[in-house]
Image: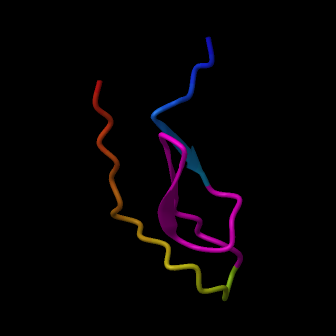
Amino acid sequence: MIVQPMSDLHSDCPGFGGYPIGRTRLISNPSGYAGETTGFDPNMTVELGK
């Protein structure tokens, strides 16, 4: 049996966003380095369901 997570939160990426890989939704909201524009949203919330 292969188990695939429903979502994955990560920050080691070049920009803000979310995208699917198979049935997994990857979500990123990196703040980046000083002076870097990443699209970071300090008010972002993620709702996780069952």
Q: Position of residue 39 (x, y in %)?
A: 50, 79
Left or right of 43, for residue 30: right
Image height check: is 47 above or below 30?
Answer: above
Left or right of 35, for residue 4: left
The count of marks equals 0
**Camera-side residue of 2 and 40:** 2
**Camera-side residue of 16 and 5:** 5
The colour scheme used here is rainbow
Q: Residue at x 59, y 69 (%)?
A: 31
Image height check: is 31 above or below 7?
Answer: below
Q: Residue at x 69, y 65 (%)?
A: 13
Which quadrant of the structure image shows residue 43?
bottom left
Q: Residue furthest top?
A: 1
Image height check: is 16 above or below 23?
Answer: below
Q: Residue at x 52, y 30 (%)?
A: 5
Residue 27 is covered by the magenta coloring: yes
Q: Position of residue 34 (x, y in %)?
A: 69, 81
Residue range highlighted in magenta: 11-33
**Camera-side residue of 31 and 21:** 21
Q: Position of residue 50 (x, y in %)?
A: 29, 24
Which quadrant of the structure image shows residue 47?
top left
Q: Residue at x 45, y 34 (%)?
A: 6
Left or right of 33, for residue 26: left
Which part of the image, by quadrant, shows the N terminus? top right
Image height check: is 24 above or below 5?
Answer: below
Q: Position of residue 30 (x, y in %)?
A: 59, 65
Residue 19 is covered by the magenta coloring: yes
